[in-house]
Image (cartoon, rainbow, N blue to C red):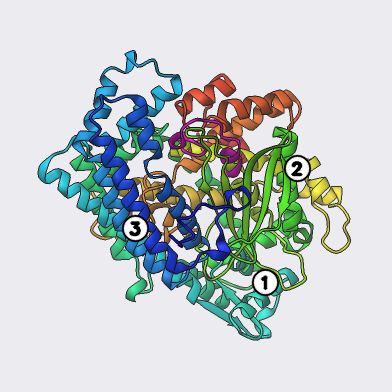
Amino acid sequence: MSNPLLLPWNTPFGLPPFAQISDDDFAPAFEAALAEARANVAAIADNPEPPTFANTIEALELADASLGRVLGVFYNLAGADSNPARQALQREFSPKLAAYGSEITMNKALFARIEALWARRGDLGLTPEQERVLMLTRRSFVRAGAQLDGAPAERLKEVKERLAVLGTQFTQNLLADESEWFMELSEADLEGLPDFVLAAARAAAQERGIEGHVITLSRSLIVPFLQFSPRRELRRKAFEAWCARGANGGETDNRAITVETLALREERARLLGYENFSAFKLETEMAKTPEAVRDLLMAVWAPAKAQADADAEVLQEMMRADGINGDLEAWDWRYYAEKRRKAEHDLDEAELKPFLQLDKMIEAAFDCATRLFGLGFKPLDLPLYHPDVRAWEVLRDGRHMAVFIGDYFARASKRSGAWCSAMRSQKKLGGEVRPIVVNVCNFAKPEAGQPALLSFDDARTLFHEFGHALHQMLSDVTYESISGTSVARDFVELPSQLYEHWLSVPEVLSRYAVHAETGEPMPKDLLDRLLKAQNFDMGFQTVEYVASALVDLAFHSGPAPADTMARQAEILEEIGMPKAIRMRHATPQFAHVFAGDGYSSGYYSYMWSEVMDADAFAAFEEAGDPFDAEMAQRLESRILSTGGSEEAETLYTDFRGRMPGVEALLKGRGLVAAE
């Protein structure tokens, strides 16, 4: 019992003792915790006492507490700071966890107890929250195959185990492609690159032990390179490497994985009695059906494509003015869009970035949470899992609310993107537990002694992930299964996307957007230009996103394709994808969809939530104050604190009085609906 993952954590706030944990501890801790969880579940199923909510449902909620603790540490590290040992453990753990899940949901004695409770639920004297947990527990068992027997049940178990293996393999292949590729720049190649790009490229070179400058496939480095480099062939080389992730041939190629994954998901859905995987997946979401999702996406696609087509003509003319007679290509768009933004809005990234310091944007996100919800943030000096990582204690009126961990810089060991996770979720069952919440981003790391500078899009990402963190930190429910972000997938993005709006509040920017060298606030003229240009290039941004969402939906709502790349091309042809814009996430790197089931047939959910977030922020505007106390209290009490304790539509309607239409979204994006 010397394994630190299994011992009591006598650390401040019960944080994992990172300094004492080695990779060798994970496998034995996992096996011990898994055995304990299995024994606990068997004890529930075999209990000779009649089933009660306490001895069945609540006992299940607590059955895998040790396993959750071990995996909460492991999977956070595996995503944010991977290494070969952790990758091998992921490959080992994923099928075992899938098998364990199937054992539980296909345990006939256990399901019989749940069914018995469900049959007499009206006589159990349950609270509304308990009724909800009972319903969700039973539904999860049914959707996992609890009512299947014999060969179909065994086959479903095999399918889920194989899908777990494929999702892990997809993630690791993508990380390998992203971390291995880089492009060295000669002195001549540095032409046109502003200081912040040069500094990031030097820092990336130093991380790889190289003199000079390199461009990597980190979004925070490659995007500004594409925006500013006048060297078209270099832009093309970098862009094509970015698009080729997961499709380079060899061991890290993801294309065959996507084909097998879609076939297995379709088989899973049919085993459970659904026409296709999308029908299965969307049944429990706000959207309910593939048709409802497609209707929303196409309502946005038409005006977005019209805008993008018009913008492409402008950029093509700019390219001709530069003496380039070929067609506008995907590696040209960002370069000419940046030049156009400078010309039309007198705004460029190089002028803006010194005013968007990472530390100041963190302060801004914290300050908005203080003004809205009364939260305070106290820096913690504690051992964490990487030197770049920071932590704060979150307090309200002297009460401990959470520990918030921020991991902001890109590194080769971190998967791409940005996300929020919880090493520990809030719950009250078995005693009050407050969460440990982690925000992970991939911002370009500065050179030693220099401030980290963000793009406006980076700053928006920081606010977005912090909105997810607030959903976790303000959670106030009894049961962990409905805590924090445990809500419908197309509702989970509402708090995060809504919080982005506060970044654009002028009084927030005027206070926290201060120059990195002079400390002077952003001039009002620049602030006005920034806010006026917020919807610049929105046709491009909307098209690249909606195209990805439509491909995801089509993959899962029709027959599984034999060739995902050919099917992707067909879908893009059908919708009239503009030639010079690519999907935001092409199939071989579409981790949202193929790294696990999370956003499979669910990438649309960002836009579904955006319909609500545009309308929800309008409530604050109608109140006349973005920090209106009564509206903030309603937001917390009806959405942020409630987790999944009620249906998402009920929660939103309670907050706003009605469900919104797509008009607020189109208005917010500056798009006019097509006739």
The residue tagged 3 is 31
> On screen, 26 above or below 125?
below
Is 66 or 488 nearer to us in this picture?
66
Q: Is residue 378 left or right of residue 572?
A: right
Residue 199 can be seen, yes or no: yes
Rendered-image quadrant of the N terminus: bottom left
User: Whole-Å distance between the Cαs marked 1 and 2?
Assistant: 28 Å
Amino acid type indicated by mark 3 = Glu
Q: Is residue 410 left or right of residue 142?
A: right
Residue 643 falls inside the magenta stretch:
no
Is 187 or 647 nearer to us in this picture?
647
SS class, disc 2: helix
Which of pointers 1 and 2 lies earlier in the amino acid sequence? 1
User: Whole-Å distance between the Cαs marked 1 and 3?
Assistant: 42 Å
The magenta span reads 469-487
Of all residues, the one furthest to the front in this rendering is 1
